Image (cartoon, helix red, strand yellow):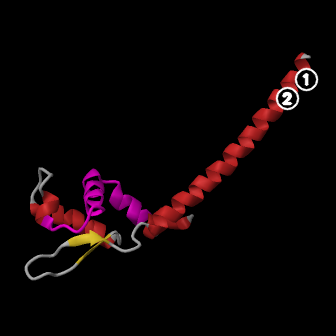
Amino acid sequence: MNELHNGPLATKFAALSDPTRLAIVQRLAEGEATVTELAAPFAMTQPAVSRHLKVLESAGLITRRVDKQRRPCRLAEGALDNLDEWLAMLRQTMSVNYDRLDDVLAEMQTKDERTTE
């Protein structure tokens, strides 16, 4: 759980908490793109988009490669794996808790039915 507060998982969540960076990641899910292509839908300069890309790169969410004058970006392989694992753990925990709540409510209903008979 400590990783959620100050580890790579926290860094990824922090990077994705910005709407622009989240939109960039969503776009990169479709495939590789240059800074110019990524900047197109935003009302901001390419240097501003580049700053967002640096945050995503530092969080391990994207990678860049050199292609002559271009530096296309793509999602990093396995970038979302630990997020997915954490969410799966959270879903499992919530499922167990809801099952317990269902049991308690069923027991309460049974007791209530016995007292009203």
Residue sitting nearer the eye, 9 or 113? 113
| Mark 2 vs 1: CB contact within 8 A | yes
Q: Is residue 62 above or below residue 100?
A: below
Q: CA distance from mark 2 to mark 1?
A: 6 Å
Please tell me whether mark 2 sits on a helix, a strand or a loop: helix
Q: Which kind of residue does numbered mark 2 sit on? A: Thr
For residue 19: magenta? Answer: yes
Residue at 22% across / 69% down in the picture? 32
Residue 70 to residue 96: above or below: below
In the figure, is residue 49 to the left or right of 115?
left
Q: Is residue 22 magenta?
A: yes
Q: Position of residue 64 (x, y in %)?
A: 23, 76
Residue name at image x 68 percent, y 47 percent: 97
Residue 6 visible somewhere in the drawing: no
- Identified at 90% across, 20% down, the residue is 115
In the rendering, which numbered label is found on residue 114? Answer: 1
Magenta range is 10-35
Total residue callouts: 2
Q: Residue furthest front?
A: 30
Query: Circle 2 sits on which residue?
Result: 110
Residue 7 in the image: above or below residue 98: below
Where does the N terminus fall, quadrant-wise? bottom right
Task: Give me the residue at 37% from left, 74% from top.
Answer: 77
Left or right: 81 as drawn, with respect to 31: right
User: Residue 99 appears in which quarter of the rendering?
Assistant: top right
Residue type at mark 1: give it.
Arg
Quadrant, the C terminus: top right
| The quadrant where residue 47 appears | bottom left
